[in-house]
Image (spheres, helix red, strand yellow):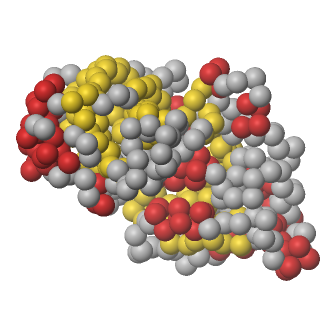
Amino acid sequence: MSHGSVSLMMLVSPALFAQSLVGSGYADLIRKAFDAAPSAAPLVCSVTPVSPLLDFSLRFHTGYVIKIPLGTYQGARHKWVALLRVTPKDGEPVYFAAGLKMPNLPAQVDTNGEARGGFLVGEGRYRVELLVVDDLHRVCQNQWQIRTTEPGGARHADLAIAPGAVQELGSELSPRQPPEDAPIERLTILVQAAPLLRSHSTLQNVDIAALAEMSTLLLAKLPARSVRLVVFNLAQQAVLFRSDPPARFDVHAAIQAMRKLQLAEISYGALRDPLGSAALLDSLVWGELLDARPSGVVVFLGPRIESPDISRESLVRSPQGALRFFYVQYAPLHMVVSNPTPMFRADMKSIDDLDDDSEQYLPAPAESDGIEHLVKSLKGETIVVRKPADLGSAIRRITRAIAADRSVQ
């Protein structure tokens, strides 16, 4: 039993049961574990790298899948720990650690245990080294290279992570500090929390991840001095979450509200009032128009869904002026989520890689999107986002429109 293996197993603790960056003290320990690994007893395992994919935070999402035969484990809970070293070309290595407890196993188990890990990177080349150790001090080691480049339609300036950077999953985007003369005094983001597939009674992980990533990217890229975030659902005719200035833009609280949404449970009042969804949007829009300090820009964000035409006369005749409305319409056609786990938020695949029966993942097109009609009646603009690169383009269009408005004032 090598000293490196013993030190490595000391890292297994509840704090590391989700993959996370490690501090300098643990980094020294992990370096020693990598150095000691060649002399340790081998652990049979397979490692499949996950190709980098641009997500809706405009950062590249990559990772790995580990499979380990469980036949050699019996009885009380065993542990694995996975250590990761990611080294950018011409950069310093970044270290991650993740631990996993296995359940009690019966004798003669003939199956594989599987775990997934993920992280975020910017443009560039990276060397990835993975070390998996179990509590029997056996070691599995693998390494591979990854390379990320600007996808079609994206620009380097759009990306929300620097070239050569490495971040853990879930790390927040850092909004740039807006100048005192920022062109947007107040920004409102109105998120329609709805699943892409009408057959789903809850929001799927991929739905929540995309809406959260797009919301935080809008915050990071648009120069606003203060921000209001509202999450609503038309089917429930309800506001699920609201954060008004000067409160912090709390996307984590918004995510929790979306996770609790149960579309199978519709209130009696909502069933009784088929025009309630129109009334909800009416109140949201008029709330912005009549606010003592109205937002300069209002952005609706959400999937394209079938809903009643909400461009009612009261809204058509609503006062115009400095208030600008946009609808970032989320209508992906080439992304699905497959087997999400706590260790890997979403395993994204291209539609070209799907089986023939995978049409179930694709959203059915909406025949009539009420929010789109509403924004049109308010002389606003709808921008369709089908892939992450489209979101960068949408933000540029919003920024140009704001700049044009400012130039004529």
> Is 301 displayed left or right of 72 in the figure?
right
Residue at 14% of width from left, 45% of height from top?
Answer: 6
**199 lies above or below 71:** below
Residue placed most toward the observer, 74 or 232: 74
Where on the picture, by quarter, is residue 122? top left
Residue at 11% of width from left, 32% of height from top?
Answer: 36
**93 lies above or below 329:** above
Residue placed most toward the observer, 176 or 168: 168
Whole-percent x, y for residue 72 in the image: 39, 38
- Is residue 404 visible in the rendered structure shown here? no
Whole-percent x, y for residue 153 in the image: 52, 24
> Is 3 displayed left or right of 60 in the figure?
left
- Is residue 50 visible in the rendered structure shown here? yes
Residue at 81% of width from left, 40% of height from top?
Answer: 364
Whole-percent x, y for residue 243 in the image: 50, 72
Whole-percent x, y for residue 370 in the image: 81, 54
Q: Quadrant of the N terminus?
A: top left
Residue at 71% of width from left, 47% of height from top?
Answer: 196
**188 lies above or below 79:** below
> Is 133 displayed left or right of 253 in the figure?
left
Where on the picture, by quarter, is residue 224? bottom left
